[in-house]
Image (spheres, rainbow, N blue to C red):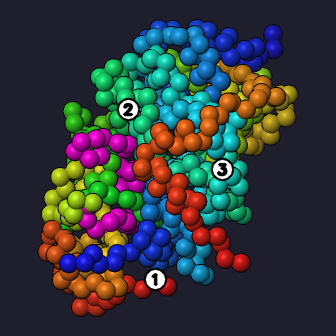
């Protein structure tokens, strides 16, 4: 029988994600690299007590909508739907706005484990590569060191960091074929590429599914061996409904206002 | 005493960018540092690196003009340019941790006289670790760009950091809105002062004792 990892719907793609599961979620600081529709489907399913592993704590859809992103959900949808009991995360909160996770941490509703970005990435990569643990100097002498085994290597304190395994990985890629081979677009690979294969089941949301053989073998970034399911985004989806910019602005912090001002105020390139 | 004029954010970024040497691979943090990407000195070619997985991209675009799949770690769209490459996050962080980034510029809450850095949390609020610890550990040269004192007039250049640490003894140069200070094995050396500021005035807003460089001069931007 031909190998076919393509599934028919987003709800089907996440159907076996269970209460208490550990779920890796791809994406970096924009919605472009997030598996937005898988996250929506998981929120619809309403599983409880998830442990999530992600770069970010999420921003929510409004900020992405005003910037013109078509698909705007990030991991915030799991947080604000109350599905998460523990978050393993590098950037839980944001200077741009107060997100759901920050409120939940403050209220004691969600447990959080903060991990330096490189250590988080390498812990995920280790799970994929069958490495149990590794030593790294990052975090030595800081709060990150608390409770960890150490060893001096090349005269510097290194911390023992364990691989981080998951039941499911939800990732975003650009194109896929029915074998699960993936390519990404521009700067959106982020941790998606790293998470592919780091969980028992890897589910990839893609912009386009192409025929087997259409992806150049020289340029495939994630070989199909790491991917279990592929689901295609709808071609003609309407843009997510953006709220009025004025209403959104009132929720942003002073820091974000400053950030946006400097962006808008940057000098135009001469000539 | 009337408030003396300090450098604004763009001018600090301009001063930071003077540090970029021909051929440098540069990573810029959120805030003042990222502004420096628009001020690379004429005639020097540098490669910008971003955590999300790109190297060798161009300046930040104007809002609404870029490709939403091509952003820096701050989420700002950037211009593509010839020679640019893309990669995943494991590769990207390997570049940072593995000593392949020549210059990293970060913001900070505090820097100690030994070059300890505190830039990810305040005593009241833990923010975001992100790539800060990886960069502090791995960048060949770490430059801090920050205001010299807090809004409440507390020193940010301190004897010992009281804020949660990012990494120990990692900062090489501090560029503030009134001074440029080098971190050396013999302590902090005042190299430059902002226009209109004297070394004594800078010292009065700095907790540890500064050694005033024999060539200490007024900051120039070009």
Q: Nearer the viewer, residue B171 or A122?
A: B171
Task: Specify the segment rendered in magenta.
Answer: B121-150
Quadrant of the rendered structure where residue B217 is? Answer: bottom left
Instruction: Please say if the residues under marks 3 and 1 sit with CB atoms less than 8 Å apart.
Output: no
- Look at mark 2 in the image and give the residue it sits on: A102
Question: Which numbered mark, 2 or 3, is in the foreground of this view?
Answer: 2
In the rendered structure, does residue B101 fall within the stretch colored magenta?
no
- Look at mark 3 in the image and give the residue it sits on: B70
A198 to B68, vertically: above or below: above
- Disc 1 sits on a residue from what chain? B
The answer to whether residue A237 is seen in the rendering is yes
Q: Nearer the viewer, residue B216 or A247?
A: A247
Q: Which quadrant would the C terminus of chain A be assigned to in this image?
A: bottom right
- Disc 2 sits on a residue from what chain? A
Q: How far, Cα to Cα, is label 3 from label 1?
A: 30 Å
Question: SS at mark 3?
Answer: loop
Q: Kindly identify the residue that appears in the image at 68 percent across and 30 percent down.
A: A240
Judge from the rendering whether residue A165 lies leftward or rightward of residue A109; answer left or right.
Answer: right
| Residue A96 on image: x %, y % | 46, 44
Q: Kindly identify the residue that appears in the image at 22 percent across and 59 percent down.
A: B152
| Residue B114 on image: x %, y % | 20, 65
Question: Which numbered mark, 3 or 1, is in the foreground of this view?
Answer: 1
| Residue B88 on image: x %, y % | 58, 43
- Look at mark 1 in the image and give the residue it sits on: B221
Q: Are marks 2 and 3 on the same chain?
A: no
């Amino acid at each position: 029988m031909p190998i076919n990892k393509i599934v028919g719907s987003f709800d089907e793609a996440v159907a076996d994600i269970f209460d208490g599961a550990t779920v890796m979620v791809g994406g970096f600081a924009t919605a472009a690299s997030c598996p937005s529709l898988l996250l929506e489907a998981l929120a619809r399913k309403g599983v409880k007590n998830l442990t999530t592993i992600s770069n970010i704590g999420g921003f929510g859809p409004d900020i992405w909508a005003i910037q013109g992103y078509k698909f705007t959900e990030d991991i915030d949808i799991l947080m604000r739907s109350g599905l998460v009991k523990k978050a393993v995360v590098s950037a839980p909160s944001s200077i741009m706005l107060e997100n759901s996770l920050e409120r939940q941490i403050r209220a004691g509703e969600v447990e959080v484990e903060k991990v330096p970005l490189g250590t988080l990435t390498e812990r995920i990569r280790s799970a994929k590569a069958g490495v149990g643990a590794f030593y790294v100097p990052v975090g030595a002498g800081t709060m990150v060191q608390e409770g960890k085994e150490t060893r001096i290597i090349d005269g510097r304190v290194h911390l023992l960091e364990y691989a981080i395994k998951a039941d499911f990985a939800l990732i975003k890629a650009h194109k896929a074929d029915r074998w699960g081979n993936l390519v990404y677009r521009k700067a959106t690979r982020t941790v998606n590429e790293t998470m592919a294969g780091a969980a028992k089941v890897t589910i990839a949301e893609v912009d386009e599914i192409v025929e087997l053989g259409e992806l150049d073998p020289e340029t495939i970034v994630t070989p199909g061996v790491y991917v279990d399911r592929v689901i295609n985004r709808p071609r003609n989806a309407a843009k997510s409904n953006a709220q009025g910019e004025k209403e959104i602005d009132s929720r942003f912090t002073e820091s974000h206002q400053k950030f946006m001002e400097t962006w808008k105020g940057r000098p135009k390139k001469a000539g | 005493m009337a408030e003396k004029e300090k450098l604004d954010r763009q001018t600090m970024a301009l001063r930071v960018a003077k540090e970029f040497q021909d051929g440098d691979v540069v990573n810029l943090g959120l805030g003042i540092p990222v502004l420096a990407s628009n001020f690379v000195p004429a005639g020097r070619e540098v490669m910008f690196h971003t955590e999300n997985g790109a190297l060798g991209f161009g300046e930040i675009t104007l809002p609404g003009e870029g490709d939403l799949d091509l952003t820096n770690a701050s989420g700002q769209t950037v211009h593509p340019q010839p020679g640019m490459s893309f990669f995943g996050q494991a590769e990207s962080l390997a570049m940072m941790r593995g000593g392949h980034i020549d210059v990293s510029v970060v913001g900070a809450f505090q820097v100690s006289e030994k070059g300890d850095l505190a830039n990810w949390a305040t005593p009241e609020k833990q923010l975001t670790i992100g790539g800060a610890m990886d960069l502090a550990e791995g960048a060949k040269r770490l430059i801090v760009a920050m205001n010299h004192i807090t809004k409440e007039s507390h020193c940010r250049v301190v004897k010992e950091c009281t804020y949660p640490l990012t990494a120990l003894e990692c900062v090489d140069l501090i560029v503030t809105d009134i001074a440029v200070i080098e971190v050396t094995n013999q302590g902090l050396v005042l190299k430059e002062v902002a226009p209109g500021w004297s070394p004594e005035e800078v010292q009065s807003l700095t907790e540890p004792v500064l050694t005033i460089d024999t060539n200490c001069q007024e900051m120039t931007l070009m």
